[in-house]
Image (cartoon, coloured by chain):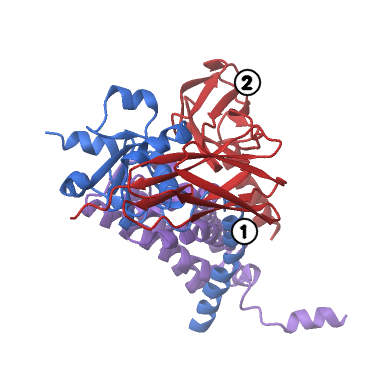
Amino acid sequence: MKTHIIAFALSIIISLSARAELKWEQTSLELHPTPNDKQAIGHFKYQNTGKTPVHFKSVHASCGCTTAQTQKDEVPAGGSGEITATFNIGDRTGTQVKTVTVETDEATNQKTVLTLKTIIPQQLELNPTFVFWKQGDKPDPKTIMVKAGKEFTVKHIKVTSSSPDFQTKVEEKGNGEFQIDVQPQETKNIVASTLTIQPEDSQKVFYATARITNAPTVQ
Amino acid sequence: MAEKEGMNQTPSAQRPTLNVEASAEGATSNVKHRTLNIIWRVVGFIVAGIFLYAGAIKALDPVQFASDIDNYKILPWPISVAMAFYLPWLEILCGIALIIRVLYRGALSILSALIVVFTLATVGAKARGLDITCGCFGHASQNWSFPSHLATNLAILAGLLALWFQSSSKS
Amino acid sequence: MRSSLVRQVLILAALALAPGVGGAVYFRHKISWRSAILPSELATVDQARAWGGNVIWVDARPDDEFASDHVPGAISLNEDRWNELLPEFLAAWSPGKKVVVYCSSLSCNASREVARRLRKEAQLPDVFVLEGGWEAWLKKKG
């Protein structure tokens, strides 16, 4: 039994030492930007634990919304540095997972994938963000449900319509939930409105669209 | 006292009693037996090590593995995901079982079945002209050619079968 | 003899379930169980062309890529400027239209994300992702 354990440990050690020269502090980072942040930045630190210098052949991100930079192209033995991944949040929502693929000239493990998970805080969730009436439909009110995100307390919201063709009415359901009733004056003309929804005491603005559309085209 | 008597009475069929056989057959066959045993142990470690390594690589990135399984277009996506989470650990556990010699033949059977399935899937994908980039070594083997993939799998299968016959001749 | 082999296999198979489930929990945010893409949400270039004037093409790529070239008549809608671009897209939409979203190729994610948001947030029916993306369109151009 003892010989088994020694041999097992040896095989693990041998296989581990044949691993890459570049050691990453973390290959997966979780970021929590605030609602007003435009970018989320992840610092992937590495160290060259091998005996030869390591060159970065390429560093590229999974999407155009993320840029990744190395500070230097060559890492001497024993040297360290970081790859900075900048994720442009834009109008994205929810949990966004983007990756950065790093290619080096290491003997083993030429490709490392760095993962950037960004949890974008959602102050308000609108459902749906688009309400419409076909030309000629009855101008009945349609509902947009608004719910505050888990980490947020929203007591009141302000809703404005960019066009007088649509009227809005807000009902506070309590518990961070609101009901917006949207109603067009009439559905004869093709008109539209952008509804601006703003939580009280907040700079952030949310949008919904209301419009009268063409009647469906006959196939 | 009582313990010692008990030991003498337990059947010694499971433990190779080298000493008894040595005195009966001579010193040279004792060395031969020992060497053979060592060779089998080494083969066992190599095969186990391969599956431990392969399993570990896939267990560390099941997302990629699920994608690779999906590329074979054999299983529906949710099953591919389930397999991607499950199979690597099955490989790791069976590898460990081979090394510590517990559930030995069960491990051999499972690993043999896995290799056969992986190989058939690879051959099938090649026949269908699919562009797959993975065998059982995950993305680490993506630069291998098809023949070397096949050869490696067959060599591993041969090792597993040899270990199987060796273990059945022992008992 | 044989039953003990089956027993060994079952024990190993069962033991592997624990770390397997552990991995599924650990990586739960990195993977979607539902689909890589549901086939019913994909459309090929030929299919989209067959829908003729009933199609609205949506380009989910970044602004600079859209500016350099895009499917004729396509509307730009990407996640960088979603709030600004969505109303423009909705102005072109009417019930019955089929929406085909594309990004650069088979492997990019933007078209799936845009399609998902159109289905989920705007609750539009008939939203498809173009199989093969812009690459596939270019191949079929001639």
Answer with left or right where residue B111 lies relative to residue C131. Answer: right
Q: In which image quadrant can residue B15 be found?
A: bottom right
Q: Are marks 1 and 2 in contact (CB under 8 Å)?
A: no
Q: Residues within 10 Å of mark 2 (few under 14, many from 20)?
A: some
Residue visible at 42% across and 38% down in the picture = C86
Along the line of sight, the residue nearer the viewer: A185 or A86: A185
Residue kind at label 1, given as amino acid type: Gly
Task: Locate the N terminus of chain B by quadrant.
Answer: bottom right
Q: Which residue is mark 1?
A: C22
Q: Residues within 10 Å of mark 1 (few under 14, many from 20)?
A: few
Along the line of sight, the residue nearer the viewer: C120 or A87: C120
Residue kind at label 2, given as amino acid type: Gly
Furthest residue toward left: C142
Q: Which residue is mark 2?
A: A81
- Judge whether A7 appears above or below A162 on screen: below
Q: Which chain is purple?
A: B
**Rendered location of residue A150, percent (x, y):** 68, 50
Please, what secondary structure does the residue beneath circle 1 have?
A: helix
Q: Which chain is blue?
A: C
Please, what secondary structure does the residue beneath circle 2 have?
A: strand
- Name the colour assigned to chain A in the rendering: red
**Rendered location of residue A204, percent (x, y):** 62, 34
Answer with left or right where residue A51 lies relative to residue A103. Answer: right
